[in-house]
Image (cartoon, grey):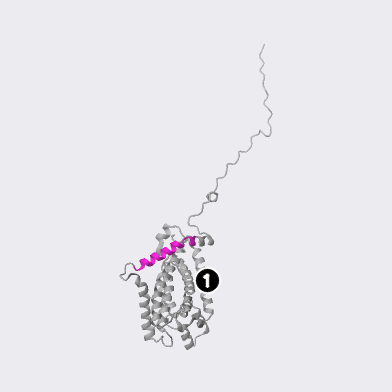
Amino acid sequence: MSSQVLHTPPPPTTTADAPGPAPAPASTPTPAELAARYGLTVSGARPSLPEYVRQLWARRHFITAFATAKLTAQYSQAKLGQLWQVVNPLLNAAVYYFIFGVLMGTSKGVPDYIPFLVTGVFVWTFTQSSIMAGTRAISGSLGLVRALHFPRAALPVSYALQQLQQLLFSMAALVVILLAFGVPVTASWLLIVPALTLQFMFNAGVAMVVARIGARTPDVSQLMPFVLRTWMYVSGVMWSIDKVLADQRLPHWVHVLLECNPAAVYIDLVRFALIDSFHASLLPHHVWAVALGWALLAGVGGFIYFWKAEETYGRG
């Protein structure tokens, strides 16, 4: 008998069992997607303006300490030391008095000319030194900028604060001069607090503007002394703007430029606060508004202008 082999028929093929296309491999996330997933940010990226303000406020102790350290080290090699903070502006005032007060006769018709002159020199030096220091705030501190992460606006602000501290030292000598020339102490002296506050805002704002320009073009620090010297001569440091405008027939736009010159405005505020013959009640009311406007324009505008280039400082 022959053996019979039983063959089991294969199961019918269904659509579900039919081979289909291979599944697509999972896509590899991009570096940007990975950074967003794990909360990573670009190193040195510019923060938002509110965050930048918050970071700067958090470094306020560093700003104060840095300004104080720079002021202490400024004359550390000199034998007179910190006395030069007072001697320097006094020597400038003496030179200006000899040239303008004696030789050119600008003291005629100006009451209390020596207190007038010394006050103008001290207040102008505050603005001049803040701006000059601002031109080198970034370019002169590249080692610090490249080594540490902090809001770069701390540098020009700290330089302006350093000059404010130096002005406060000089004010002690100014008080002695005022008393020596018979200028009485009055309640209007308290007005120098808001006046110097507004001037500090203006100086810090301009320092941030020139700091950004100087970071890209360091040669601006060589040009700035000529600009500042010209600015000083039209700011009434050594002569009375009101007297010149009264004596000379000048176009109206010249009057407006001279009277709204920010340096002249802040000098006038301090003079009218301290010197009795320039009593504060005689100061036109619009001067305070102009001083506030310049402080906000330079302070806020300069800060935003500096912040917009935050990620570029120290590179290249």
| Residue at the extreme left of the image, as rendered | 79
Q: Secondary structure at mark 1?
A: helix
Q: Classify 221 as above or below 121.
A: above
Q: Is residue 211 magenta?
A: no
| Residue at the extreme top of the image, as rendered | 1
Q: Quadrant of residue 236?
A: bottom left
What is the crowding at mark 1: few (fewer than 14 residues within 10 Å), some, or many (at least 20)? some
Q: Is residue 76 left or right of residue 258?
A: left
Which corner quadrant holds the C terminus?
A: bottom left
Q: Position of residue 54 (x, y in %)?
A: 51, 61
Which corner quadrant holds the N terminus?
A: top right
Instruction: Specify the principal SS of the magenta part.
Output: helix
Question: Closest to the observer: 21 or 115?
Answer: 115
Residue at 51% over, 75% down: 291
Marks counted in the figure total: 1
Q: Quadrant of residue 313?
A: bottom left
Question: Closest to the observer: 312 or 52?
Answer: 52
Q: Position of residue 288 (x, y in %)?
A: 52, 77
Q: Position of residue 108 (x, y in %)?
A: 41, 88
Q: Position of residue 259 (x, y in %)?
A: 50, 80
Mark 1 highlights which residue? 296
Q: Is residue 66 magenta?
A: yes
Magenta stretch in the rendered image: 55-75
* Three-letter code for the amino acid on which mark 1 is drawn: Leu
Q: Classify 188 as above or below 56.
A: below
Question: Closest to the observer: 273 or 96?
Answer: 273
